[in-house]
Amino acid sequence: MRLHFDCFSGVSGDMILGSLVDVGLPFNRLVRGLKALPVEGFRLRRSAVMRGALAATKVDVDITKGFGTPLTVAQIRRILNKSTLPTPVKEKSQAVFDLLAQAEGKAHRVDPHHVHFHEVGVIDSFVDVVGGVLGLHLLGADRITASPINVGSGTVQSAHGSLPVPGPAVAALAAGLPIYVDGPARELATPTGVALLKTMAQEFRGLPPMQVRNVGYGAGTADPHHWPNVLRVFVGDEEPDSQASSDTIVELQTNIDDLNPQVYESVFEQVFAAGALDATLTPVTMKKGRPGIVLSVLVPREKVEPVLGIVFAETTALGIRLADVRRRILPRRFETVSLRGGLVRIKLGMAKAGRTKAAPEYEDCRRIAERTGRPVKDILEEAVVAYRQGVSEKAKVRRTK
């Protein structure tokens, strides 16, 4: 099952809980599941509310008793370990609190292990975090995505005075995530909500191709005028005719007409070492009829700056174009075949209808060719034959069982 969070009005822990209940998570199962926490002093309450023109579910955590002293990350880990929650829920919940501690530590310049979760509202954080992770577990979501996050704008009041939105913790958590500003001048994304999505979502993107089964709305506490303060969630199934996942990468491109061609080999080696996914050279005719080269490099978002630095330092480029590029990717895995002279990894792409694309890893074949003195093309062909024979033998074994 695929689940997609639409964060057009930001995200918070209670909005995630509300959206999951609204989209079909049985409220009673959530309440029973949270009883596995060795924590007292709270109860869950749900209500139907309106936010702007949208009907939504609001889930509140009513606190009757808080913790006596502030909690550290180590104490939170012990509480989770003592619980009878499913192991994946414990691990993911702890990962969220670790992220929160790192963000708070970065914001206040202290070691994350020394971060204390103060105020009575730490129970809110416990329930929001564990409830969100548990809710996704109970729904059986096997692929979770989220849109870019609207973080809000303006200022917010804290114990330390007025702070800009997003606050320091959200700003730290937002590293590597797509964020933007829209709507009323107020805080729309909380540290708990952003940390939950950063831990649980496999990808941040627009609404992916899916067959939607249900749509839910989780209400935030604030109800700004003329603005629907809700988190929308889509639940559905991946398109049956598409096994490919998708993501967004960055294409770096620059035109060059004055670089010694021998330098490109070094440029390619360095950009690949820095994390580039692919690099190409395309001959073009530039202004005034001069022959030139377009250098294109595909890079994951988080690797853009190191690769940019290499291209600027190692080429004559004075400017580099950057563009987001969406790509579709077949599920892939590796198998290994044994040949005379060594092992060769076979990269497998899983197409629809059970079809598989198989390609030997060139570097493995090249090393065998160097050791044996045989042509690389022969090793490549032999690896494909060995893989196909292995598939055929496995099929025979299955038929005889």
Image: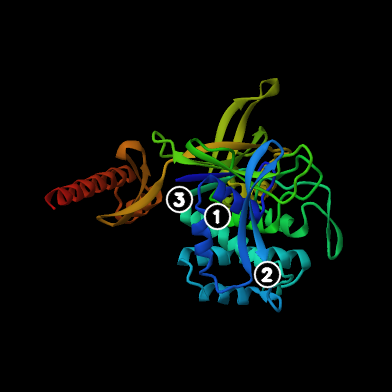
Tell me the residue that label 2 is attached to: 64
In this rendering, position of residue 263 left or right of residue 26? right
Mark 3–mark 2 Cα distance, whole angstroms, equals 35 Å
The picture places residue 114, in percent across and down from the top left corner, at 70, 75
Which is nearer the N-term, disc 3 or disc 1? 3
Q: Secondary structure at mark 1?
A: helix
Looking at the image, which residue is at 79% across and 40% down? 225
**Residue 250 visible in image:** yes
CB under 8 Å between discs 3 and 2 = no
- Is 339 above or below relative to 5? below
Q: Nearer the viewer, residue 92 or 59?
A: 59
Q: Residue at x 73, y 60 (%)?
A: 169
Question: Badge 3, how many Cα within 10 Å: few under 14, some, many 20+?
Answer: few
Neighbor class of circle 1 (other Cα within 10 Å; few <14, some 14-19, many 20+) is: many
Residue 37 position in % (x across, y down)? 54, 70
Taking the spot 36% from the left edge, 42% from the top edge, the residue there is 350
Q: Nearer the viewer, mark 2 or mark 1?
A: 2
- SS at badge 3: loop
- The residue at which mark 3 appears reads as 142
In the figure, is residue 166 to the left or right of 13?
Answer: right
Q: How is the image coloured?
A: rainbow
80 relative position to 318: left or right: left
User: Reading the chain from its start, which is encountered first: label 3 or label 2?
Assistant: 2
Q: Position of residue 194 (x, y in %)?
A: 65, 54
Amino acid type, label 3: Asp
Label number found at residue 360? none
**How crowded is the residue under tag 2: few (<14 C-alpha within 10 Å), some, or many (20+)?**
few
- Judging by the rendered image, the residue that carries numbered circle 1 is 200
Nearest to N terminus: mark 2 or mark 1: 2
* Kind of residue at badge 1: Met
Residue 244 at x, y percent in the picture:
44, 39
